[in-house]
Structure formats: C-alpha cells, structure tokens
Image: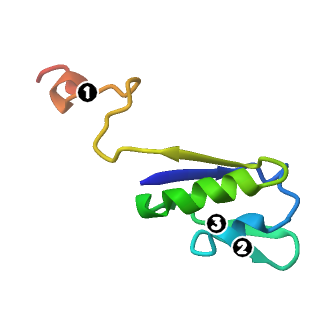
Amino acid sequence: MVRIAVDLNRCQGYAQCAFLAPEIFAMHGEEVLLYDPEADAAQRDKLAQAAAACPVQAILVDAVEPDVVEPDAVDVSAEAVSGGR
C-alpha cells in the first residue's frame, strides 16, 4: 500500500498529478483536487511521477508495509488493562 498526502493549502490546481495518475487524482471543477489517500502499490511509479511533476511540490508519497507494527504502538492485552482479574 502507498499512502498519499496532499498539502491542499499549497496545491494550486495545476492538475499535473491528475494527468499523470488519473486513477488516483482528479480535479473537481477548476480548483478542487480529489484523491485516494491509500493507493495500491502497483501505482507507485505513476505516483512518483505525479509527485515530481507537481510545480509546488504539494504531494507526499509514502510506502507503507501492511504488516509492520509502528514503533510507537503499544500492545496492551485486556488482562493488563483490567488489572489481571
């Protein structure tokens, strides 16, 4: 899975991303960008091209492994929460 974030305050609606990766990005009207924040990993190359083509660098693409536990995540069992009763 690939996670996408777009700084909509920075986006100026040039639509280069929608042209290069229409499966992920779409313009609604002339100024509103719609996008899927979690894209399939198969789209990674198109997403990288779309991010690189953004004139204001408003797109961040981050690869995420689905089975990886975040280092800050804490696994607390129900027994620990209930006090071991």
Q: Is residue 47 left or right of residue 59?
A: left
Residue 83, quarter of picture: top left
Question: Dots 1 and 3: beta carbons under 8 Å?
Answer: no
Query: Which residue is rendered at x = 70% and y = 51% of the image?
Result: 52
SS for dot 3: strand
Q: Position of residue 16 (x, y in %)?
A: 77, 66
- Looking at the image, residue 11 lies above or below residue 68: below
Q: Residue at x 57, y 65 (%)?
A: 36
Q: Position of residue 31 (x, y in %)?
A: 87, 70
Q: Position of residue 6 (x, y in %)?
A: 70, 52
Q: Are marks 2 and 1 in contact (CB under 8 Å)?
A: no
Residue at point 78%, 47% (across, down):
57
- Closer to us: mark 2 or mark 1? 2
Give the residue type at disc 2: Phe
C-alpha span from label 1 to label 3:
35 Å
Residue of label 1:
76
Q: Residue furthest bottom?
A: 29
N-term-proximal mark, 2 vs 3: 2
Mark 2, residue position? 19
